[in-house]
């Protein structure tokens, strides 16, 4: 698991990017709550706590970026699936474009050419979270 | 959902704490979050999960307070907070509150009615015992009149008076104010007309009437009362003592109060000298 730290700055950063990350996962395919939580946790360092995903989903739904539906198939437990909406896709597209530039800018400021990049210290280590055994 | 997971004490405690923390959120939002967390736990935990498993899953979820904080603005204004809090009150809570308010209002109304019950008043008086009636001397000064009898020291003397109760409450005369004539009149006794078939003006419809204690006067009714005492007052020759009202201790419903009943403009006087040794 990648430890991205618990300082307030990182918490704010996580909070800011968690919404687009949820939209990105839902853009791949609809997911139910626990599935979404596990996938986000597996990505590593995005979640401060699993439970905060649900208030976020509700806010995204209230903003019209996702919708939810109960699926109750025979032989399976009833699950509430979340779907990205067209407005959600537009927002994700816009964020992706902004993020690329933003990340490059932050990277250039934090790691000028004279500094050694920390990513080169641990080559090959994947920042994944295996808390749920995903 | 499987009941087994949601019946786990740790899970129940967590969901209860979450409900409490969400009290300041709109009720629909709070309910939805609780349902989502319950569904999450139900799916994440196997039916045979140990307490360690449950604790680990709850720790991953985060504290109920942090979830509630993530679900709403950090601070609501006082009014909105109150409104949200009130919206969590179920219909039976409001029904119970309404019942309590209705009972309190009714009780307060009754209490006020008892306190403000019309006071007793007297419309006729006279000495009770023939020994006093025979020796009474009446006099008049302006609008007031006075009837005077010799004090019979150490003996029981008394008066009879007609008393009206015009209130909606039965009034029960328990006695006189303890400070009324203090040790000058001792063993004060009050009895009232009674009987199984008295009409509103105290006349027996059938059978005979008698006097009993405590004196009970039904609403909008009239009864004769007898007030007697042992005269212990110490008077010299030409000395006298008198009273023109009696402070009765009266029970009206659940309250007891003092009612000062004037004796229809009549003053009752005991004249000296006392027939026993006075110190």
Image: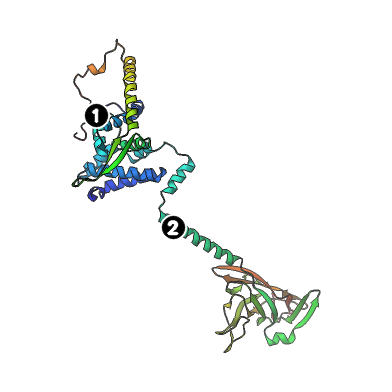
Q: Residue at x 29, y 29 (%)?
A: A21
Residue B179 in view (yes/no)? no
Q: Residue at x 73, y 82 (%)?
A: B150
Q: Is residue B279 left or right of residue A98?
A: right
- Picture coordinates of residue A43 (x, y %)? 24, 29
Q: Farthest residue in the top direction? A: A114
> Disc 1 marks which residue?
A43
Badge 2 crowding class, 10 Å Cα cut-off, few under 14, some 14 to 19, many 20 or more, is: few
The image quadrant that residue A61 belongs to is top left
State the mark number for residue B10: none
Q: Is residue A134 left or right of residue A68?
A: left
State the mark number for residue B95: 2
Element class at badge 2: helix
Report the number of numbered marks. Answer: 2
- Picture coordinates of residue B92 (x, y %)? 41, 56
Quadrant for the C terminus of chain B in the image: bottom right
From what the image shows, is residue B12 above or below residue B216? above
Considering depth in this image, is A22 or B142 the residue closer to the camera? A22
- Picture coordinates of residue B126 (x, y %)? 70, 82
Residue A128 in view (yes/no)? yes
- Picture coordinates of residue A97 (x, y %)? 32, 22
Considering depth in this image, is B39 or B232 the residue closer to the camera? B39
Q: Farthest residue in the right direction? A: B142
Chain for mark 1? Answer: A
The image quadrant that residue B277 belongs to is bottom right
Element class at badge 1: helix
Badge 1 crowding class, 10 Å Cα cut-off, few under 14, some 14 to 19, many 20 or more, is: some
Q: Residue at x 56, y 84 (%)?
A: B195
Q: Residue at x 51, y 60 (%)?
A: B104
């Amino acid at each position: 698991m990648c430890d991205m730290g618990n300082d307030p700055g990182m918490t704010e950063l996580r909070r800011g990017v968690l919404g687009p990350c949820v939209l990105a996962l839902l853009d791949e395919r609809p997911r139910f709550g626990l599935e979404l939580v596990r996938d986000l946790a597996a990505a590593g360092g995005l979640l401060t706590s699993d439970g905060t995903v649900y208030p976020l989903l509700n806010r995204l739904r209230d903003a019209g970026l996702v919708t939810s539906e109960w699926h109750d198939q025979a032989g399976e437990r009833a699950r509430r699936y979340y779907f990205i909406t067209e407005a959600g896709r537009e927002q994700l597209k816009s964020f992706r474009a902004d993020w690329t530039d933003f990340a490059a800018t932050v990277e250039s400021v934090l790691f000028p050419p004279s500094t050694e990049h920390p990513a080169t210290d641990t080559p090959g280590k994947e920042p994944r979270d295996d808390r749920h055994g995903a | 959902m499987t009941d087994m997971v949601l019946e786990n004490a740790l899970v129940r405690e967590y969901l209860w704490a979450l409900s409490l923390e969400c009290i300041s959120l709109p009720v629909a939002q709070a309910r939805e979050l609780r349902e989502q967390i319950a569904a999450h736990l139900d799916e994440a935990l196997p039916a045979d999960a140990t307490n360690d498993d449950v604790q680990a899953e709850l720790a991953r979820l985060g504290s109920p307070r942090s979830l509630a904080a993530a679900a709403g603005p950090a601070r609501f204004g006082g009014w909105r907070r109150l409104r949200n809090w009130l919206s969590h009150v179920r219909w039976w809570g409001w029904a119970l509150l309404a019942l309590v308010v209705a009972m309190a209002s009714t009780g307060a109304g009754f209490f006020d009615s008892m306190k403000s019950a019309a006071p007793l008043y007297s419309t006729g008086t006279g000495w009770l015992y023939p020994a006093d009636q025979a020796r009474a001397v009446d006099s008049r000064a302006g609008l007031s009149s006075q009837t005077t009898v010799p004090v019979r020291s150490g003996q029981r003397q008394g008066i009879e008076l007609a008393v009206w109760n015009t209130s909606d409450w039965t009034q029960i005369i328990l006695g006189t104010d303890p400070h009324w004539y203090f040790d000058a009149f001792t063993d004060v006794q009050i009895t009232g007309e009674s009987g199984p078939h008295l009409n509103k003006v105290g006349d027996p419809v059938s059978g005979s009437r008698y006097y009993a204690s405590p004196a009970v006067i039904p609403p909008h009714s009239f009864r004769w009362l007898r007030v007697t005492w042992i005269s212990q007052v110490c008077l010299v020759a030409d000395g006298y003592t008198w009273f023109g009202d009696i402070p009765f201790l009266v029970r009206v419903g659940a309250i007891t109060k003092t009612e000062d009943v004037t004796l229809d403009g009549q003053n009752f006087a005991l004249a000296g000298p006392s027939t026993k040794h006075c110190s």
